[in-house]
């Protein structure tokens, strides 16, 4: 996640308990419901699916990350596999090492020891959360899941040991209650959230780097005073529709590096693991509040490679 390196993909399969997933309630960080970051260190993983011939961009496919609940000798032990929809519940989990011991030492990345992503299978709701770790290694955070269905929980972290690599482990979470599926929002070039408009230029390319530029405006005027959030002017997570293949990308530049301005544009470099539809979630901070804009993007020749897309239905709280 450091400046100057390419962002690559994480993949994570979503085996939803109810077959389709729904919105995730916000605890402390931005929420996207019903809709629907100078380069940093790359997460060194690519989808297990092979890219089309000529689309590797010189990079060999590596074992998929995020598909497993266990990887690299570490396991995500989710103590709360089920909650009630519409009710505030405490989500708890432990990261265990190969000996089954709870991990209590982590490297801080983007000001946090661990980043927790919770998303619905239909990608209508997304949360970027930062739970609290107890001395015994148990992580916890309150959540309020607005709808019944299956969810995927992603723990993004790096153990505090020499040579440790960043990992993203995934586990399923279910919420009980009335169940109703939603369709993926149609692609559009802008997203509106909390009175802001965000325009997306660029696109995702299967197996190749692509630049994504997002411009933030309000009341028709560019927002040139974005504030650092977790050490950057923006954070972007992309999830592939269908299996929630996971891409965690950050801006091409960081506050104070002498090359990056605090808006209105934040640019990213990302590589899509395959063709298909993706949901992009941009977190940005302005006037002391974090907002999340959501976009639908299609990568691959069948959908029109590199065409900019987004939707206007995302909103944050």
Image (cartoon, rainbow, N blue to C red):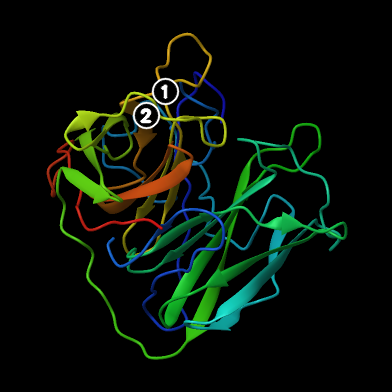
Q: Which residue is drawn at the image coordinates 51% and 80% (left, top)?
A: 174
Give percent across and percent down for residue 84. Answer: 53, 85
165, above or below 311, in the image: above
Give percent across and percent down for residue 186. Answer: 15, 58
Please, what secondary structure does the residue beneath circle 2 have?
strand
Please, what secondary structure does the residue beneath circle 1 have?
loop
131, above or below 281, in the image: below
Give how far apart the Cα atoms at labels 2 and 1 are. Answer: 7 Å
Q: Which residue is drawn at the image coordinates 57% and 77% (left, top)?
A: 88
Q: Is residue 87 left or right of residue 126?
A: right
Query: Circle 1 sits on which residue?
Result: 252
Query: Circle 2 sits on which residue?
Result: 269
Q: In which quarter of the image is the N terminus?
A: top right
Give percent across and percent down for residue 310. Answer: 20, 47
Give percent across and percent down for residue 251. Answer: 43, 28
Q: Is residue 244 left or right of residue 51?
A: right
Q: In this view, does 158 lie to the left or right of 17?
A: right
Q: Which residue is drawn at the image coordinates 41% and 54% (left, top)?
A: 245
Q: Do the residues labelled 2 and 1 touch (CB within 8 Å)?
A: yes
> Can the viewer see residue 299 in this picture?
no
Circle nearer the viewer, 2 or 1: 1
Q: In which quarter of the image is the C terminus?
A: bottom left
Instruction: Specify the label residue 50 is tagged with.
Output: none
Q: Residues within 10 Å of mark 1 (few under 14, many from 20)?
A: many
Going from the N terminus, do you reach mark 2 or mark 1 first?
Answer: 1
Q: In which quadrant of the rendered view does residue 207 lie?
A: top left
Q: Which residue is drawn at the image coordinates 52% and 32% (left, top)?
A: 42
């Amino acid at each position: 996640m450091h400046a100057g390196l390419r962002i690559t993909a994480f993949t994570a399969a979503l085996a939803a308990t109810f077959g389709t997933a729904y919105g995730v309630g916000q605890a402390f960080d931005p929420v996207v419901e019903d809709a629907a970051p100078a380069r940093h260190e790359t997460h060194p993983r690519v989808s297990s699916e092979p890219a089309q011939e000529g689309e590797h961009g010189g990079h060999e496919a590596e074992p998929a990350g995020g598909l497993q609940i266990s990887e690299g000798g570490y396991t995500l032990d989710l103590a709360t596999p089920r909650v009630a929809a519409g009710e505030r519940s405490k989500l708890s989990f432990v990261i265990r090492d190969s000996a089954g011991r709870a991990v209590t030492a982590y490297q801080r990345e983007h000001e946090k020891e661990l980043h927790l992503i919770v998303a619905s299978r239909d990608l209508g709701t997304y949360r970027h959360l930062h739970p609290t770790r107890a001395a015994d290694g148990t992580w916890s955070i309150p959540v309020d899941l607005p709808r019944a269905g299956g969810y995927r929980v992603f723990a993004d972290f790096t153990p505090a040991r020499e040579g440790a690599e960043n990992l993203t482990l995934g586990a399923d979470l279910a919420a009980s209650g009335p169940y109703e599926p939603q369709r993926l929002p149609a692609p559009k070039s802008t997203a509106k959230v909390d009175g802001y408009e965000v325009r997306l230029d660029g696109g995702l390319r299967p197996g190749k780097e692509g630049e994504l530029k997002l411009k933030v405006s309000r009341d028709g005027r560019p927002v040139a005073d974005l504030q650092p959030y977790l050490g950057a002017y923006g954070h972007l997570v992309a999830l592939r529709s269908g299996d929630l293949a996971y891409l965690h990308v950050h801006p091409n530049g960081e506050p104070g590096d002498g090359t990056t301005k605090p808006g209105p544009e934040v640019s990213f470099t990302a590589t899509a693991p395959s063709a298909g539809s993706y949901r992009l979630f941009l977190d940005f901070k302005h006037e002391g509040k974090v907002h999340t804009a959501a976009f639908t993007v299609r990568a691959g020749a069948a959908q029109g490679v590199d065409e900019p897309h987004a939707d206007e239905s995302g909103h944050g709280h």
